[in-house]
């Protein structure tokens, strides 16, 4: 059986973002039900030198859309980082999922061997072949920021657990 880069990239990114939206929805409900100003949760961080929840979501969506676009050799849409509330973040996630899922599977063909360059603030330019980019940069980076967002909400007392993070499980 042959596995396509599209079949590994798009479903994994979409699922991670859907579950991020799910835990954010629970975070918004938590704030509303307890009379907490939503900005308190959105500006929470796990440690002073880490980004707050709001920025974690922005980075997760940027990593997902830009990484999928790199794998498909297309230009990603630009999203301004102007969200201020849970609804804004949900809309950003929805736009990101719609973009990722709109990429034609054929655009990913040969992506495992494609040369990929990622510009970073702290490490300069990183160069990968497509499969290494997917396995060693794109997926871990998206999961890192989604996990951090989950952990911030959990730390804030939002009642979420493993299956809120993982989502629906399909078995053969």
Image: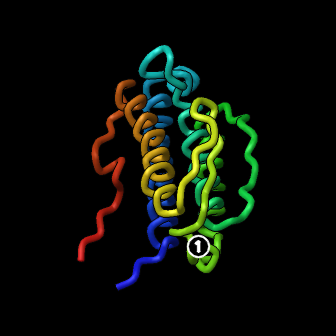
Q: Is residue 43 visible?
A: yes
| Residue drawn at 53 percent across, 69 percent down | 113
Relative to 161, is 130 on the left or the right?
right
In-image side of 128 versus 30 (left or right): right
Residue 84, position as x, y percentages in the image: 67, 31
Q: Residue at coordinates 32% horizontally, 35% vertically from top-left?
A: 159
Determine whether 153 is above or below 165 in the image: above
Q: Position of residue 157 (x, y in %)?
A: 35, 26
**Is 69 drawn above or below residue 43 in the view shown?**
below
User: Which colour scheme appears in the figure?
Assistant: rainbow
Of residues 37 and 44, which is closer to you in this image?
44
In which quadrant will I find the N terminus? Answer: bottom left
Closer to us: 94 or 49:
49
Q: Residue at x 53, y 62 (%)?
A: 130
Q: Quadrant of the C terminus?
A: bottom left
Secondary element type, mark 1: helix
Quarter-of-image position of residue 98: bottom right
Nearest to the observer: residue 145 or residue 4: 4
Residue at numbered disc 1: 108
Which residue is farthest left? 172
Q: Residue at x 33, y 39 (%)?
A: 160
Q: Is residue 36 visible?
A: no
């Amino acid at each position: 059986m042959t596995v396509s880069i599209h079949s590994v990239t798009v479903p994994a990114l979409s699922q991670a973002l859907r579950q991020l939206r799910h835990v954010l929805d629970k975070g918004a409900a938590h704030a509303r039900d307890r009379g907490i100003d939503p900005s308190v949760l959105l500006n929470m961080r796990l440690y002073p030198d880490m980004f707050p929840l709001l920025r974690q979501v922005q980075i997760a969506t940027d990593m997902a859309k830009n990484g999928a676009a790199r794998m498909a050799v297309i230009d990603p849409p630009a999203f301004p980082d102007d969200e201020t509330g849970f609804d804004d973040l949900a809309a950003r996630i929805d736009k990101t999922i719609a973009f990722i899922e709109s990429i034609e599977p054929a655009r990913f063909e040969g992506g495992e061997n494609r040369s990929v360059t990622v510009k970073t603030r702290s490490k300069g330019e990183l160069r990968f072949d497509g499969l290494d980019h997917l396995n060693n940069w794109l997926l871990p980076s998206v999961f890192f920021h989604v996990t951090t967002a989950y952990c911030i909400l959990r730390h804030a007392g939002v009642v979420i657990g493993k299956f809120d993070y993982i989502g629906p499980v399909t078995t053969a």
